[in-house]
Image (cartoon, rainbow, N blue to C red):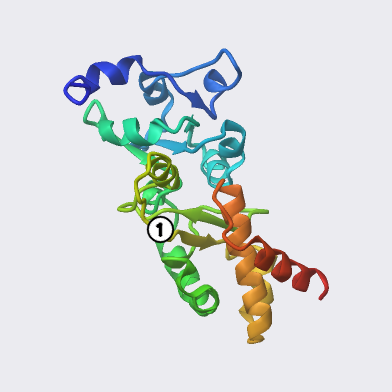
């Protein structure tokens, strides 16, 4: 079976990548090549899967990882969400981790004490956003990866099926579950400052909805209520 032959298959599959060797129409890279380029302390092979290569490359999580010096494999085919989890690890040494799944940021390092302090500082902000979004999200978290101009992103719980997997199930006539994503927010972004010291529930709702829906768009996921998104966006633009 393919599972029994996964080690052999893992040596012949090729991928697009944020590295130059996997960028461009004719360029592809392998797990073996990736491992050769890994940072000395790196323990995992990072990847992102979806349905559009251009969108995946523009994903703020990919940018965050590459800015820290980590290469990310780009997997734009729907079948990748079935094949890659089957590998589990490459050569039993390197775990395959999707950057758009919760928990993948554990390998990024950084000052844990500073991160915990910041998480405590922004806990009231996170709780405001969580309350405003209600059951639209599984959780709201302060991101350990987002930097710069990106205020928010979507990740999926490590135990949940991916958005692409659910879409495939529904396309085959199966009743795929409703996905409740995790919203991560960038504490350094000016948008978060708007609600950090503000208790205006209308403003908090507007900001929260825009943070959530723009993150869905960037992740290539469906916005269930486009008119509501536009309403909240217009509210902010008019202030």
Identify the residue at horizontal 76%, vertical 73% (top origin).
Answer: 235
Q: Residue furthest bottom?
A: 199
Q: Residues within 10 Å of mark 1 (few under 14, many from 20)?
A: few
Element under disc 1: loop
Residue 52 placement (x, y as % from top left) = 56, 34
Q: Quadrant of the N terminus?
A: top left
Which residue in the rendered view is the most extreme toward the right?
A: 238
Q: Nearer the viewer, residue 65 or 5?
A: 5
Q: Residue at x 61, y 63 (%)?
A: 225
**As displayed, is residue 168 above or below residue 23?**
below
Residue 188 seen in this snapshot: no
Q: Is residue 128 above or below residue 101?
A: below
Extreme residue in the front direction? 173
Q: Tell me: 51 left or right of 107.
A: right
Given residues 148 and 56, the one toward you in this image is: 56
- Compared with 189, 101 (above or below) is above
Residue 194, position as x, y percentages in the image: 69, 75
Q: Nearer the viewer, residue 126 or 154?
A: 154
Location of residue 6 in the rendering, given as x and y in whole percent from the top left corner: 23, 23
Residue under pointer 1: 178
Image quarter of the C terminus: bottom right
Left or right: 213, with 75 as reference point: right
Residue 32 drawn above or below residue 135: above
Q: Residue at x 37, y 43 (%)?
A: 173
Q: Left or right: where does residue 97 sit relative to residue 184? A: left
């Amino acid at each position: 079976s393919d599972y029994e032959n996964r080690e052999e298959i893992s040596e012949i599959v090729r991928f697009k990548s944020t590295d130059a060797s996997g960028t461009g129409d004719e360029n592809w890279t392998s797990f073996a090549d990736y491992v050769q380029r890994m940072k000395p302390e790196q323990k995992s092979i990072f990847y992102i899967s979806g349905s559009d290569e251009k969108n995946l490359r523009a994903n703020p999580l990919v940018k965050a990882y590459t800015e820290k010096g980590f290469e990310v494999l780009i997997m734009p085919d729907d079948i990748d969400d079935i094949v890659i989890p089957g590998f589990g690890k490459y050569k039993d040494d390197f775990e395959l981790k999707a950057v758009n799944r919760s928990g993948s940021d554990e390998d990024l390092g950084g000052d844990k004490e500073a991160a915990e302090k910041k998480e405590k500082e922004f806990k009231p902000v996170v709780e405001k956003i969580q309350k405003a979004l209600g059951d639209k999200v599984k959780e709201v978290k302060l991101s350990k990866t987002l930097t710069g101009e990106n205020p928010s992103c979507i990740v999926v719980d490590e135990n949940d099926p991916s958005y692409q997997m659910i879409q495939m199930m529904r396309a085959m006539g199966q009743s795929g579950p409703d996905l409740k994503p995790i919203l991560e927010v960038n504490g350094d972004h000016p948008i978060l400052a708007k609600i950090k010291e503000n208790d205006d529930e209308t403003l908090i709702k507007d900001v929260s909805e825009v943070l959530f829906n723009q993150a869905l768009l960037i992740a290539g996921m469906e916005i269930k209520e486009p008119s509501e998104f536009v309403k909240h966006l217009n509210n902010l633009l008019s202030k």
